[in-house]
Image (spheres, rainbow, N blue to C red):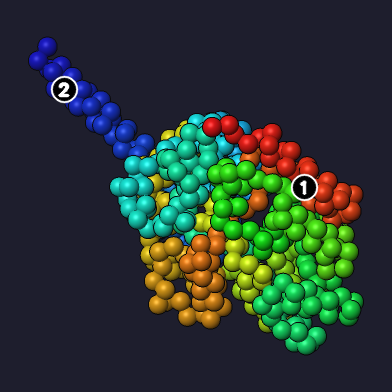
Amino acid sequence: MFKQAPRLFFALLAATMLVSVRPATAQETRVLKVWHYESENGAMGTAWADAMKKFEESHPGVKVEYEQKGYEQIRQTAQMILSSDSAPDVMESPKGNATAGFLSKQGLLTDISDEAAKRGWDKILPPSLATVCRYDDNGVMGSGKWYGVTNYGEYVMVYYNKDMFKQYNVTVPTTLEEFEAVMDTFVKAGVTPIALSGAEYPAQQIWYELSLTKADRNFINAFQLYQGDVDFHGPEFTFGAETMANWVAKGYISKDSTGMKAEDMGVAWEGGKYPIMISGSWWYGRLMTEIKDFEWDSFLFPGGKMHQGSGGNIWVVPTGSQNKDLAYDFIDITLQQDNQTLLANAGGIPVNADLTKITDPKIKALNENFAKIVADDGLAFYSDWPVPGYYDVLVQNTQELISGSKTPSEFLDALGSNYAENKPTP
């Protein structure tokens, strides 16, 4: 019997060691799943790739499993994905009532308010940018709990081909009337001025940008935050719809643009086919990398102080994430100054960069224009944000406005009725 004791002892010791090793092995094989839809050579894509590398370096034994998605893919399938076992641990999400707000109301996003306070994210992001991070119980942005974190700013601007402006002897306009005079010059020369995608977001952004030349903060708060009644046939939206239809009639915008995707629009402008592209700062870093054959620059859409823009799309942590602690660590890395400075120098608009390390004059101008908008309280968010499903309604109706199958009044009727049907009741 005593001869069996050592064997029993060593057997028990081996079993104990095996049990103690298993949790460590499991920890060494943890995986953080990250999804986002930024281009690899864009500012955010560049910075976030670096953040993933730094995350793995600072988390030995943890692997980042990254999947690039399309904006439309996430926008259209987010509810289904976040309700399934396939949800990532951290994901870039469109922001606003219709998207992140709707998902938070459905219980699909984690309340990260405690993390935002503990890690100082609420101090890094000023209120105007934090608007897109917080949602109330009705999914309305601007107050309530933190369900996401933005780490960059964005706004819509006018990109222009400096060589073409010089060739046709036109200068950067400072008023809407001057802008139309510039485009008249191109039309007379047989050149369609504006590269446009009618099949995706850019067309609705032109209508909204035109409307904003007649808008003020009270109008924006009524439309976006339900702080008042919205007259869809009032001076703001009427001017936007009628002017956009007029721009098509004048040849500033091609009717063929109704079938063009945003990517095709950008590629056509990069190819020098059009002198003007009205779109967001998310193109900036990519344009800096890809345009080799002409000089280009940008200016704020003329005619008013309100401009489409906000904090950028947000990092969210799905309710079903199995690695929330790792997700918070990753988000924190993207907000640190070194990553933010990298984002800036890649052509982005940082929220926490060392601005003394930005040397490119184009990037300086990009950030100065954004600072001017913020200082003027001019961030007007985006037209598709207010109610769920509004993006698709806007795409369809701007296509019909461009093609002429709907009058400006019919266009506004459609937008107004859908807004009223889907606006949440307090």
Q: Is residue 290 left or right of residue 62?
A: right
Q: Position of residue 403 (x, y in %)?
A: 88, 54
Q: Tag 2's secondary structure?
A: helix
Residue with the mark numbered 1: 412
- Does any portion of residue 322 appear in the rendered image? yes
Task: Indicate which disc residue 9 carries.
Answer: 2
Quadrant where the N terminus lies?
top left
The disc labelled 1 sits on which kind of residue? Leu
Label 1: how many Cα within 10 Å (few below 14, some 14–19, many 20+): many
x, y percent for residue 335: 41, 58
Q: Is residue 81 visible?
A: no
Q: Quadrant of residue 369?
A: bottom right
State how far apart marks 2 and 1 are (Cα). Answer: 83 Å
Left or right of 143 on screen, residue 159: right
Q: Residue furthest left?
A: 2
- Front disc: 2 or 1: 1
Q: Looking at the figure, which quarter contains the C terminus? A: top right
Question: Tag 2: residue type?
Answer: Phe
